[in-house]
Amino acid sequence: MPEVVFRVRWPDSSVQRCYSPSTVVEQHFAAGEAYPVAEFVERSRAALTLASERVLAQFGFPCSRAAAQLADIERRAETFRGEGEQVVVEGFEQ
């Protein structure tokens, strides 16, 4: 499976490189787009869950790195509670 790193800029201007075991993440985000924090978390949850399920179907076990990445995104998102705060998806790396 082709792995993908998606770079995101959080509302505090920090940049994070996020891991996905599948290109499916590119179907949930667009490079250069900004998403409200809650929507970014929802989309991340959907994308990384689906990516992990693809690993499960192919290899017989889910992707622990995808689960860890999602947990990290959820933790970071909790620090941003202001209205209008957005996460920008800067791009993808394969």
Image (spheres, rainbow, N blue to C red):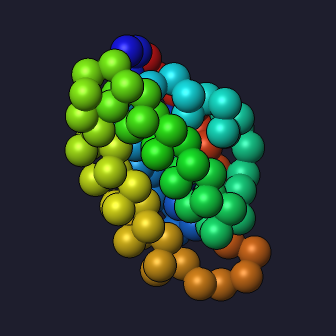
Frontmost residue, 12 versus 47: 47
Residue 20 left/right relative to 45? left
Query: Left or right: where does residue 40 sit relative to residue 3?
Result: right
Quadrant location, the C terminus: top left
Query: What residue lies at 68% left-to-right and 62% top-to-bottom?
Result: 39
Indicate left or right for 69 with 28 as reference. Answer: left
- In the rendered view, tell whether residue 45 sits above or below residue 23: below
Residue closest to the eye, 36 or 14 = 36
Q: Say above or below: 11 vs 17.
A: below
Percent of width and height locating residue 43: 62, 51
Q: Is residue 56 above or below residue 68?
A: above
43 on left or right of 51 = right
The residue most toward the bottom is 82
Identify which residue is drawn at 25% across, 28% down.
60
Picture quarter containing residue 80? bottom right
Height in image: 14 above or below 84?
above
Q: Report the label total.
A: 0
Q: Nearer the viewer, residue 44 or 89?
A: 44
Image quadrant where residue 56 sits: top left
Q: Position of residue 9 (x, y in %)?
A: 54, 52
**Residue 44 drawn at (x, y percent):** 54, 51
Residue at image coords 37%, 15%: 1
Q: Position of residue 18 (x, y in %)?
A: 40, 43
Whether residue 20 can be seen here: no
Residue at position x 42%, y 36% from top? 53
Q: Is residue 74 visible?
A: yes
